[in-house]
Image (tube, rainbow, N blue to C red):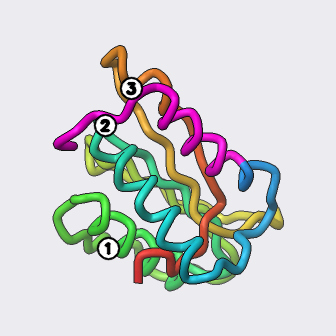
Amino acid sequence: MVSTVPDAADIAVRRKALNRFSCLRVAPTLSPEEQGEIRETLLLFNALSEYQTLGICADDLATAQAALERYAIALGCPPIKLALGERSGAVYLKFNTLKGAWYLDDYSETSRGVLVSYHGADPGAEELNGTYGPFPFDLFG
């Protein structure tokens, strides 16, 4: 958990910074400073939420699986090694950090990147509940 809980104004500022990605179809190229700020906010929201859902739209399964593993570890999940089999072409990979459940399907749309959804029932979490991204596949490594 977070040692000091940010106030609603801080969460609103951070949420606005993340929302700038919501209209994008492809994750942008970010400067190292931007990457650091986004990682900091995602990890803060992670600490304040009960669980997360990751949605990854990628050109291939290897890219999606590598991104899932990096994001999940950064969000505090134990290492994930899913036996997804082989699949060619673009994919959508979804993972629920609470249940460890996943979903994989072919993906014909043009969006690419990682979506992170935060879920929480606590009154303080209501302000951060939502889906953010797309973020770069390699944001966490």
Q: Are marks 3 and 2 in contact (CB under 8 Å)?
A: yes
The image shows residue 141 at horizontal and vertical percentages of 41, 84
Q: Quadrant of residue 32?
A: bottom right
Secondary-structure class at tag 3: helix
Is the residue 105 above or below the residue 122 in the image? below
Q: Quadrant of the N terminus?
A: top left
Residue 35 shown left or right of residue 28 in the figure: left
As measured in the structure, the alpha-carbon distance from the residue carrying label 1 to the one carrying label 2 is 30 Å
Q: Position of residue 28 (x, y in %)?
A: 73, 73
Q: Residue 125 in the image: x percent, y percent?
A: 38, 26
Q: Is residue 67 above or below residue 125?
A: below
Give the overall secondary structure of the magenta segment: helix
Q: Amino acid at mark 3?
A: Ala
Please, what is the three-letter code of the amino acid marked with disc 1?
Answer: Ala
For residue 94, above or below residue 91: above
Q: Nearer the viewer, residue 125 or 14?
A: 14
Q: Residue at x 44, y 64 (%)?
A: 39
> Can residue 61 be found in the magenta stretch?
no
In the rendered image, residue 2 lying in the magenta stretch gets the answer yes
Q: Which residue is mark 1?
A: 83
- Residue that mark 2 sits on: 48
Q: CA distance from mark 1 to mark 3?
A: 33 Å
The CA span between labels 3 and 2 is: 6 Å
- Residue placed most toward the observer, 14 or 68: 14
How many marks are shown on the rendered structure? 3
- The earlier-in-sequence mark between 1 and 2 is 2
Task: Give the magenta part as a residue range.
Answer: 1-19
Q: Residue at x 46, y 25 (%)?
A: 8
Q: Which residue is mark 3?
A: 125
- Label 1's element? loop
